[in-house]
Image: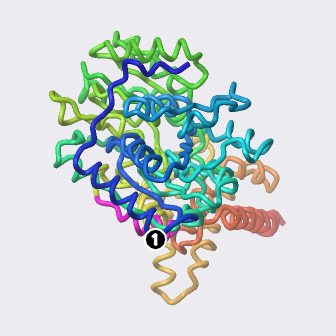
C-alpha cells in the first residue's frame, strides 16, 4: 500500500499551466491515434504537468489514463502527486496479477515490463484507456506497449527527445514534438539553479565503445580506477567543493568503491551506493545523505532518474559518456532550486562539456527529433576530433621494445592532409603509417618470427592510428574499422615476410 496521506500537492507555475493547456488542445485537435512528445528539462516539473493533464483528460473525456514508468520510485512519486490532486489511482506492481476493482479507478500507473507481461497474457488487462502517458519516453523499452493501445493517444515526456536506441528513433512512434521552456529560461525565471562549471582535462585513451554506443563499464573502470585519476578527482573536490553536499557519478561499481576508499582515507564523510543495494540499505544511505550537510555520495547508475534531493550543492562527473541524455540527467540532480540556493557547482572529469557543450546551452530539440542521426553526429564528431588530439600514451613495455619517438613523430591526420593537398589518395596515408610501423618493427626484431611477437604489443597503437584515419574520411562504423585493422595487420605481416627475409638472404 502506497502512503499518500501526508503528500502535499505541488502547485503549477504559470508556464506549467500554459503547457498543460497547449498539450490538451493539441490532443483534442488531432483526435485519436495521435502521439505527441513533450520535452522539458530535468527540474522543470514533468510529473506535475502530466499529472494535471491526466486529471483534466479524465474529467473531460471520462476515459482512463495509463501512465508508464521504468522504475518503481517514479511510479510511487507519480501516484502520490495524482492522489494529492484528487485522482484516485492504482499502481500495477509485480504483485498485481488481476484488477477486479478496475472500474473503481480512472488512472493506472505501471512499470513497463510488468504491464507488458500482463497484456501479453490478457490484452484486456486494462480497458477503456484513452490516453497513455510515457514518463522518460526516450527509453526504447516502452515501444512494446504501444501495440496494445493503437486506438489511444500517447503522450511521451522527456528531458531529451533522443531514443536510447539510435536505430529506433522517437519520430517512428510520435507524430509531433512540443518543446517546453529551455534550461536558460528556467534559470532566468527562478525555477532552476544555475551551474558554475569546472572542467579538468583528462586522457581518455583506453576507453572502448560498447554495443549501446557508450563507453563500456569495464574500460571506464580501468581508466577511472587507476591511482592518477583517483588523485585528480580528490584534487578537484578539494579545490572546488570541500564541505559541499556532493554527488559523484561513476560508470562502474569498482570505480565508485575506490572513490569511497580514497575519500575515507582523507577523512571525508562519504558513502557508496549502487543498484545491488537492498531497498532498506538504499533508503538508509539516501536518508543519511539528506540530513548530512557535508555528505559525499558516490554512486553508479541509480540516481540519474527518480531521485530528488534539492540540497545537493556539487555534481562531479567522474566518468565520460557519449549519451547526451545521461549528461543532462546527471547534471539535473543539482539544479533543484531552494530559497538559499540559486547556484550549484559542476565538476567535469570526463571531457563531457567538450562533447556536449555547457548544460545551459541552447539545443535545437526539433532538429534532434526530426534528424536524430545528424544531430548526434554533429556533436560526436566534434568531440572525437578533440579527443583525438590527445597523444597516445606508450606503455613501459613499448618504450623498452620500440623506438617510440619514431612512432610518435608520425601523425595520421597530418599525413592524410599532406596526401590530399598533393593530389594523392587519402588512403596513401595508411601506406605511410604502415611503413612507419614496419620500420620500427624491423629495427626492434631479431627475425621475422620475433617481429610477429612484437606486433602484439603494437595493436593498440595500430587501432589508434586507424581510428584517426576513419575520422579523416568521416567513415567510422565498427565493421569498417574492424576491416581496416585486419587488412592493415595482414599487409604489415606480408611486408615483414618479404622485406626481412630478403635482408636475411
Image: 154 above or below 494: above
Rendered residue at 33%/56% (across/down): 21
Quadrant hosting residue 190: top left
Looking at the picture, how far across and down is residue 349, in whole percent?
38, 39
The residue nearer to you, when weighing 387 against 60, is 60
Question: Label 1, on which residue?
Answer: 414
- Image quadrant holding the N terminus, namely top right
Looking at the picture, how far across and down is residue 296, in whole percent?
36, 20
Question: Dot 1 surroundings within 10 Å: few (below 14), some, or many (20 or more)?
Answer: few
Q: Examine the structure image and report whether residue 119 is included in the region drawn in magenta.
A: no
Image: 78 above or below 173: above
Image: 70 above or below 416: above
Question: Is residue 477 left or right of 48 when viewed as pictured?
Answer: right
Would you say residue 191 is visible in this rendering? yes
Query: Main SS type for the magenta part?
Result: helix
Q: Examine the structure image and report whether residue 363 is included in the region drawn in magenta.
A: yes
Quadrant hosting residue 362: bottom left
Question: Is residue 70 left or right of 362 when viewed as pictured?
Answer: right
The residue nearer to you, when weighing 30 against 113, is 30
Label 1 residue SS: helix
Looking at the picture, how far across and down is residue 152, in whole percent?
59, 58
Question: Is residue 136 left or right of 188 when viewed as pictured?
Answer: right
Rendered residue at 28%/16% (across/down): 294
Image: 244 above or below 85: above
The residue nearer to you, when weighing 246 against 150, is 150
Rendered residue at 46%/15% (across/down): 261
Looking at the picture, how far across and down is residue 323, in whole percent?
49, 50
Question: Is residue 481 left or right of 81 when viewed as pictured?
Answer: right
Extreme bottom residue here?
Answer: 423
Question: Magenta segment, which residues?
Answer: 362-375
- Image quadrant holding the C terminus, namely bottom right
Amino acid at each position: 500500500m502506497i502512503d499518500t496521506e501526508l503528500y502535499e500537492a505541488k502547485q503549477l507555475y504559470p508556464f506549467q499551466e500554459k503547457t498543460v493547456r497547449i498539450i490538451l488542445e493539441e490532443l483534442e485537435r488531432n483526435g485519436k491515434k495521435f502521439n505527441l512528445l513533450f520535452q522539458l528539462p530535468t527540474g522543470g516539473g514533468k510529473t506535475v504537468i502530466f499529472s494535471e493533464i491526466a486529471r483534466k483528460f479524465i474529467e473531460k473525456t471520462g476515459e482512463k489514463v495509463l501512465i508508464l514508468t521504468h522504475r518503481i520510485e517514479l511510479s510511487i512519486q507519480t501516484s502520490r502527486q495524482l492522489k494529492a490532486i484528487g485522482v484516485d489511482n492504482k499502481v500495477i506492481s509485480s504483485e498485481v496479477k488481476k484488477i477486479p476493482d478496475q472500474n473503481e479507478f480512472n488512472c493506472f500507473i505501471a512499470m513497463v515490463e510488468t504491464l507488458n507481461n500482463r497484456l501479453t497474457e490478457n490484452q484486456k488487462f486494462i480497458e477503456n484507456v484513452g490516453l497513455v502517458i510515457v514518463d522518460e519516453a526516450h527509453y526504447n523499452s516502452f515501444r512494446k506497449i504501444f501495440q496494445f493501445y493503437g486506438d489511444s493517444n500517447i503522450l511521451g515526456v522527456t528531458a531529451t527527445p533522443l531514443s536510447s536506441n539510435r536505430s529506433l528513433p522517437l519520430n517512428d512512434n510520435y507524430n509531433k514534438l512540443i518543446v517546453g521552456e529551455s534550461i536558460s529560461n528556467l534559470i532566468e525565471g527562478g525555477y532552476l539553479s544555475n551551474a558554475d562549471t569546472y572542467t579538468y582535462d583528462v586522457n581518455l585513451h583506453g576507453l572502448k565503445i560498447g554495443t549501446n554506443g557508450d563507453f563500456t563499464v569495464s574500460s571506464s573502470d580501468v581508466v577511472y580506477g587507476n591511482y592518477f585519476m583517483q588523485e585528480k578527482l580528490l584534487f578537484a573536490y578539494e579545490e572546488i567543493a570541500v564541505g559541499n553536499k556532493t554527488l559523484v557519478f561513476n560508470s562502474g561499481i569498482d570505480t565508485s568503491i575506490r572513490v569511497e576508499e580514497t575519500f575515507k582515507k582523507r577523512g571525508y564523510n562519504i558513502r557508496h551506493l549502487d543498484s545491488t543495494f537492498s531497498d532498506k540499505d538504499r533508503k538508509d544511505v539516501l536518508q543519511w545523505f539528506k540530513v548530512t550537510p557535508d555528505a559525499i555520495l558516490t554512486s553508479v547508475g541509480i540516481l540519474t532518474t527518480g531521485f530528488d534531493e534539492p540540497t545537493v550543492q556539487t555534481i562531479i562527473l567522474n566518468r565520460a559518456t557519449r549519451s547526451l541524455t545521461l549528461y543532462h540527467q546527471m547534471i539535473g540532480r543539482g539544479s533543484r532550486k531552494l530559497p538559499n540556493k540559486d547556484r550549484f557547482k559542476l565538476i567535469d572529469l570526463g571531457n563531457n562539456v567538450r562533447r556536449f557543450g555547457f548544460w545551459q546551452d541552447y539545443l535545437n530539440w526539433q532538429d534532434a527529433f526530426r534528424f536524430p542521426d545528424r544531430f548526434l553526429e554533429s556533436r560526436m564528431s566534434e568531440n572525437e576530433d578533440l579527443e583525438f588530439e590527445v597523444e597516445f600514451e606508450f606503455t613501459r613495455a613499448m618504450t623498452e621494445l620500440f623506438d617510440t619517438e619514431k612512432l610518435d613523430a608520425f601523425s595520421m591526420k597530418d599525413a592524410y592532409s599532406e596526401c590530399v593537398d598533393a593530389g594523392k589518395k587519402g588512403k596513401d596515408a595508411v601506406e605511410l603509417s604502415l611503413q612507419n610501423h614496419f620500420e620500427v618493427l624491423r629495427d626492434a626484431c631479431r627475425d621475422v618470427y620475433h617481429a610477429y611477437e612484437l606486433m602484439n604489443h603494437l595493436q593498440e597503437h595500430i587501432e589508434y592510428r586507424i581510428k584517426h584515419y576513419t575520422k579523416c574520411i568521416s567513415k567510422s562504423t565498427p565493421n569498417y574499422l574492424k576491416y581496416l585493422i585486419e587488412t592493415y595487420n595482414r599487409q604489415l605481416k606480408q611486408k615483414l615476410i618479404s622485406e626481412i627475409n630478403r635482408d636475411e638472404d
